[in-house]
Amino acid sequence: MATKTSRRKLGPATREMERINWLEFREWVPAKIDTVLLPLGTMEAHGVTANGTDIIIPLTMAREIASRVNAMIAPVVPYGFTGSLDAFPGNFTIPENVYREYVRAVLTGLARNKFKNIVMLNGHGAGQTAVLMALGQEIGRETNTRVLTVNWWSYCSDVCREVFGEDGGHAGNTETAYMLAIDPELVQRKHYTGPKMATAIPVPNTWNAYPFPSSILVYKEGEGYPNFDLAKARSYFKQVNDKVALLIEDTIQKWDMAGL
Ligand SMILES: [Zn+2]
């Protein structure tokens, strides 16, 4: 109970924008909170963990770090640009032009709601990263906001090497570990039949396939397969969240120092 009381003193009743009413929002934003975290995902097959991995990870990350970076959390954008894995059961792709315009409207709305710093916590790679990074620059320029886009898995590739002693992979060691740390029931180890379930990401312009034949894509042959070690998963989870929070703190501090 003590933690709850002290937390309340430090922030609003909730940092999640869909759970707060407009009166309290108005009290806090932008006077006391001028940063917002926007989680973005997609519905995509991820080996033996959930199709919503790219939604669940950035949303969890936002909840883990929001108090630390004094930010609100915008409602997640769950549907995204899945690309070459969208033929797997339960998957979706939003056409790129529709996705771009939808996210543009969301970002513009966050700027209109007086946030000065918009942090996109992106959960999905493929074509989505390029769309979001371009939008970050456009919206920042148009609305006079400061926009940071974080592709957490690439930004934290050093954490992967430190914890697992090897490179990562899509739905491999890293994402499976993060999901395991959130809730072991999100990872169905009994469905894992070994490295045959994975394919190494092709060297550009060598080959490509639609649908891509595996939902586990390792960056390097022989490395990055799912790891079911819970202790390593928890360590990875904590270090990734810390590293992303530090990046946000550091970037905001430097924006302020530069008077941007
Ligand atoms: Zn993913």
Image: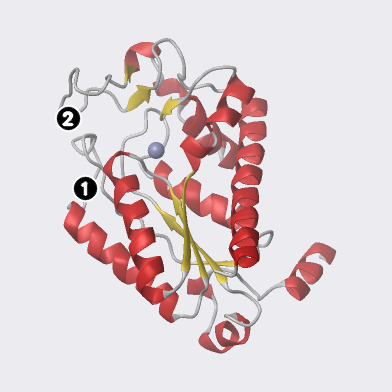
Q: In which quadrant will I find the N terminus? A: bottom right
- Pointers 1 and 2 in contact (CB under 8 A)? no
**Residue type highlighted by circle 2:** Pro
Mark closer to the chain start, 1 or 2: 1
Q: Kindly tell me whether residue 1 is visible in this rendering.
A: yes
Depth check: 217 or 152 in front? 152
Q: Kindly tell me whether residue 66 is visible in this rendering.
A: no
Residue at label 1? 93
Q: In which quadrant will I find the C terminus? A: bottom right
**Residue type highlighted by circle 1:** Thr
Bin the neighbour count of mark 2 within 10 Å (Cα to Cα): few under 14, some 14-19, many 20 and up.
few
Bin the neighbour count of mark 1 within 10 Å (Cα to Cα): few under 14, some 14-19, many 20 and up.
some
Question: Is the CB of mark 2 within 8 Å of ligand 1?
Answer: no
Depth check: 184 or 152 in front? 152
Answer above or below: position of 37 versus 129: below
Q: Quadrant of ligand 1?
A: top left
Q: Is residue 61 left or right of residue 222?
A: right
In the rendered image, residue 104, in percent from the top left (x then y), is placed at 30, 66
Q: Residue at x 17, y 29 (%)?
A: 211
Residue 7 is drawn in which quadrant? bottom right
In the rendered image, residue 88, in percent from the top left (x then y), is placed at 23, 34
Q: Residue at x 58, y 29 (%)?
A: 158
Q: Residue at x 35, y 46 (%)?
A: 129
Q: Secondary structure at mark 2?
A: loop
Which residue of the protein is positioned furthest toward the front in this rendering?
258
In the rendered image, residue 91, in percent from the top left (x then y), is placed at 25, 43
Which residue of the protein is positioned furthest toward the right in this rendering?
2
Q: Residue at x 20, y 52 (%)?
A: 96
Residue at label 2? 211
Q: Is residue 225 left or right of residue 135?
A: right
